[in-house]
Image (cartoon, grey):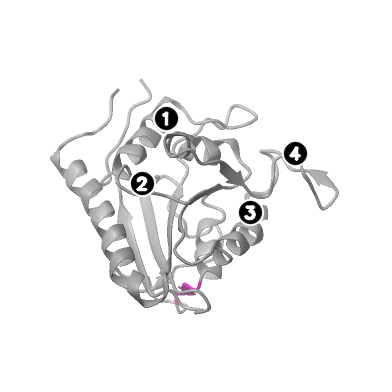
Amino acid sequence: MDILQNGRNKVMAALVIVAAQFCHSQLLAQARPVSILIVRHAESDPSLPTQPLTAAGRQRAELLVQTLRGVKFTHIFASHTTRARQMVEAIASAQSLTVVQLPVPGSTLDGETVTDQTSRRAAIEPISTALLKLPPGSVALASLNSENIFAILNRLGIAVATEGKSCTPGTMCVPCTDNSCYPRSEYDHLWHLVHEPGRAEPLAFIELRYAAGGRVSDR
């Protein structure tokens, strides 16, 4: 497996776990908060109808498995796309969980059957609603697409940056709610939110790079 597994990646993986566990454990005594991790699917093949993960994408998905190996999830979600589901299948299988895809592939939405060709923005409302309705103490993982990540973060209480300003590290904001500002060539971002049930704004929000900007190979 041709993955960047140098010391920097291992340090970043450890930091992700520490950040998630620290925020969750420190806030647990307050009101049994909900902890949510959001990741974009890895590299996929647009030449195929279902756009499955490429060899590089599968390697990145395995890197995510190693990064999150110390986190015990109660719920795992994905958008209706094959690539989003494939990104978290191994984690779900290892923890005996089912990947809940929303909207449900094969269901009917606006008179049309939900497939990989359905707009990725169709996942915004159902996944946001499911995450906001998680019971206290839940720890969820959601695999999403560049078209819906920022909009879902916004639905979870993360404000949109003021026009003309950027979201600097440490600020609780997203740069936009559509696909216009998402770094399409980047697949290694990981967002962690901690919610207190009934509270509009998250108690904590952090963005990390779980592969430390590392690249994987399709070979």
Q: Nearer the viewer, mark 4 or mark 1?
A: 4
The residues bearing labels 4 and 2 have C-alpha atoms spaced at a distance of 29 Å
Q: Label 3 sits on what residue type?
A: Ala
Q: Looking at this view, is 193 or 146 the one in front?
A: 193
Where disc 2 sits, the SS reads loop
- 33 horizontally vs 116: left or right: left
Magenta residues, dominant SS class: loop
Taking 43 as reference, is 162 above or below it?
below
Residue for badge 2: 188
- The numbered mark, 1 or 2, whose residue comes first in the sequence reads 1
Q: Which residues are magenta?
A: 157-161
Q: Which labelled disc corresponds to residue 119? A: none
> Residue reaching furthest right?
111
Q: Label 2: few (<14), some or many (≥20) within 10 Å? A: many
Residue for badge 4: 106
Q: Nearer the viewer, mark 4 or mark 2?
A: 4
Disc 4 + disc 3, Cβ < 8 Å: no
Q: Nearer the viewer, mark 2 or mark 3?
A: 3
Residue 2: x and y in percent read 28, 25
- The numbered mark, 2 or 3, whose residue comes first in the sequence reads 3
- 8 horizontally vs 172: left or right: left
Please state, as top left, top right, bottom left or bottom right, where the N terminus lies in the image.
top left
Residue 100: x and y in percent read 59, 46
Residue for badge 3: 123
Residue 7: x and y in percent read 13, 40
- The numbered mark, 3 or 1, whose residue comes first in the sequence reads 1
Residue shown at 42% from the left, 35% from the top: 94
Disc 2 + disc 3, Cβ < 8 Å: no
Asked if residue 16 is among those painted magenta in the image, a careful observer would answer no
The residues bearing labels 1 and 2 have C-alpha atoms spaced at a distance of 13 Å
